[in-house]
Amino acid sequence: MKTELKEKMMDVALEHIYKVNENPDIKLADVDAYDAWIKYDEDWDLNVHEANFGMGEDSPEENDSSKFEWYACAYPVRMGADGYEHIITEEGESLFKWEKKGKVTFITDQ
């Protein structure tokens, strides 16, 4: 994947993360706030998910966004012989891990 494309995808993922961290109770019409599948373009989908899907230790909703740990991945999308688009999960690429422990830690594979 080209660096420029990867950086643009990362921007989209970060926008989602900041929106949910700002308002942990947010309800989004088009995606799950804590496990979002975002159509990036005709060739790529993004998955942005929080490690515990917004839940605390005993499964109540977590309102302390400083505890959230996010992952973002990109997956190619291809048209199948059946005429439907398919997300090719085995060819996915990790974009980053994001967590806040006093300060934001942003980890990429590079």
Image: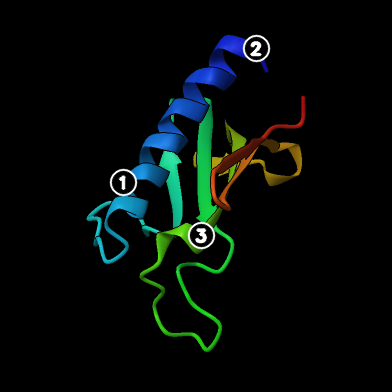
Q: Which residue is mark 3?
A: 68
Where residue 73 appears, x then y in whole percent?
A: 61, 40
* Label 2 crowd (10 A; few <14 / some 14-19 / many >=20): few
Between 48 and 61, the residue placed more toward the observer is 61
Query: Could you tell me the amino acid type at mark 1?
Result: Lys
Where residue 44 appears, x then y in whole percent?
A: 53, 30
| Residue 66 drawn above or below residue 95 | below
Where residue 57 appears, x then y in whole percent?
A: 56, 83
* Circle nearer the N terminus (3, 2): 2
* Label 1 crowd (10 A; few <14 / some 14-19 / many >=20): few
Would residue 81 be seen by someone viewing this image from the given angle? no
Q: Which residue is mark 1?
A: 19
* Label 3 crowd (10 A; few <14 / some 14-19 / many >=20): many
Q: CA distance from mark 3 to mark 1?
A: 13 Å
Disc 1 secondary structure class: helix
Q: Which residue is mark 2?
A: 2
* Circle nearer the N terminus (3, 1): 1
Q: Quadrant of the C terminus?
A: top right
Would residue 61 be seen by someone viewing this image from the given angle? yes
Q: CA distance from mark 3 to mark 2?
A: 29 Å
Are the two marked residues, 3 and 1, in contact with CB atoms closer than 8 angstroms?
no
Quadrant in the picture for residue 12: top left
Disc 2 secondary structure class: loop
Q: How many marks?
A: 3
| Residue 81 drawn above or below residue 28 | above
Where residue 42 appears, x then y in whole percent?
A: 45, 25
Query: Could you tell me the amino acid type at mark 3?
Result: Phe
